[in-house]
Image (cartoon, helix red, strand yellow):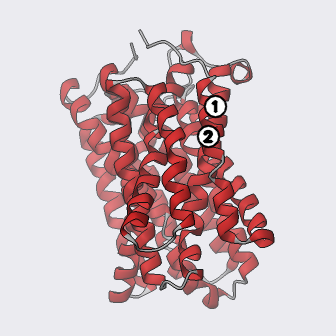
Amino acid sequence: MYSTIAPAVPADTTRKDGTLLLSCGHFLNDFYCNFLPILLPIIMPQLGLSLTLSGLLVMVLSITSNMLQPVFGYVMDRRDLSRLLLPVIPFGAICICSIGLITTKTMLFLLIALTGLSVSAFHPLGSTLVARTASIKRQGRSMSYYIAGGNLGYALAPIIIVMYLNAFSLRDLPLLMIPGFLFAFVCLRSGLTQFSTRAEQAKTFHLRQILQNASILRLNIAMGLRCVTHVSMSTFLPLLLVTNGYSGILSGSLLTLFLAGCTAGGLVGGYLGDRIAHKRIIITALALAIFPTVYFYLHPGTEPLSLIALFLSGALLLASQPSSLVWAQRAMPGGEGMASGMMLGLSFGLGSFGTALVAALGDQIGLANALLLSSLTLPLAAVFAIFAPFPPKKA
């Protein structure tokens, strides 16, 4: 069983509401994280950013928001950092919402890097607290709610920011810090910070054990390969549609449809993982995802079958993520925070590197062909998942 410090409010109440509150936190965390794509066209002329510097800025955000998550998770497994739940989201909100007030490129890069750090800190913290507060039988379902919150926040951010900037100016962006501070206040009253993130000393997971753990290594490879397709679709879908003659608004709407499929798939996948088997759900989702993905790449557009394929592609690509979190945390007893960082951060970081290769390939053979080839990572990911031993249930 997990060790906890006695909560300030009744334990049953805290456990019941913990997943909901942490899902809301994940919504806000990923909501603030996805401001940059909408803000870039505005701040580029203001600060004289070239396309090269803009690409470097996106890379800085990717590194600090994804690749550092296992590091934060590793520290959280050894130090009780549950109280970090209070400042982490307001900190990220302050950083990203201050962009309209800065006047130098150096300050811009610093704020973006710090925004990414808040993402890297929250993901392993939030998922570890979900694992602490959810019952063993509901781990997959609880993780699916938590992941769905983040997916929804990420998907809605561009729409909300466009509407906000149509009504207000960039200098009014700090008003959007308010939800982050409200979340911190609710967390303070909830008692969630009384649940320790630190693993029991007897179960401390050491870094060297990762290289000796076939289960976690193969699972990471499988999830990284999945993210190549996922990140490539998320990044290049609007460009693919625009090159096929569709408007920017319609292209953005289809990206929202894809992300909505991701949210639905994560919810269903987590539920089925608890009811059937987490490994079976991961393998099935990875194996099936190639079919709607390839269909859409071959028929990009707004035909009914294409729209259905796009939604199903997102659903199947994310259906495995809640189960991968449960799997990783079981495979790393005493290293739940680091496991979460690997599944929610490192895998997407690996996917981002793969996406860069897809982009380079697109310059040679065309974007549509490169994206089509990127979907071949999915059956390969399923093979790695098949040969990864699934860990036993926690006692």
Q: From what the image shows, is residue 106 above or below residue 72?
A: below
Which secondary structure, mark 1? helix
Three-letter residue code for mark 1: Val
Which residue is at the front of the view, 384 or 332? 384
Quadrant containing the C terminus is: top left
In the drawing, does residue 30 fall left or right of residue 379?
A: left
Residue at (34%, 58%) from the top-left corner? 181
Camera sees residue 56: yes
For the residues bearing labels 2 and 1, Cβ distance under 8 angstroms: yes
**292 versus 136 height, above or below:** below
Q: Position of residue 87 (x, y in %)?
A: 43, 50
Q: Which numbered tag is attached to residue 383?
A: 1
Query: Is residue 110 shown above or below 338?
Result: below
**Residue 157 on image: x %, y %:** 40, 68
Q: Residue at x 45, y 54 (%)?
A: 314
Q: Mark on residue 324?
A: none
Toward the right, the furthest residue is 364
Residue type marked 2: Pro
Q: What residue would you read off at disc 2?
A: 379
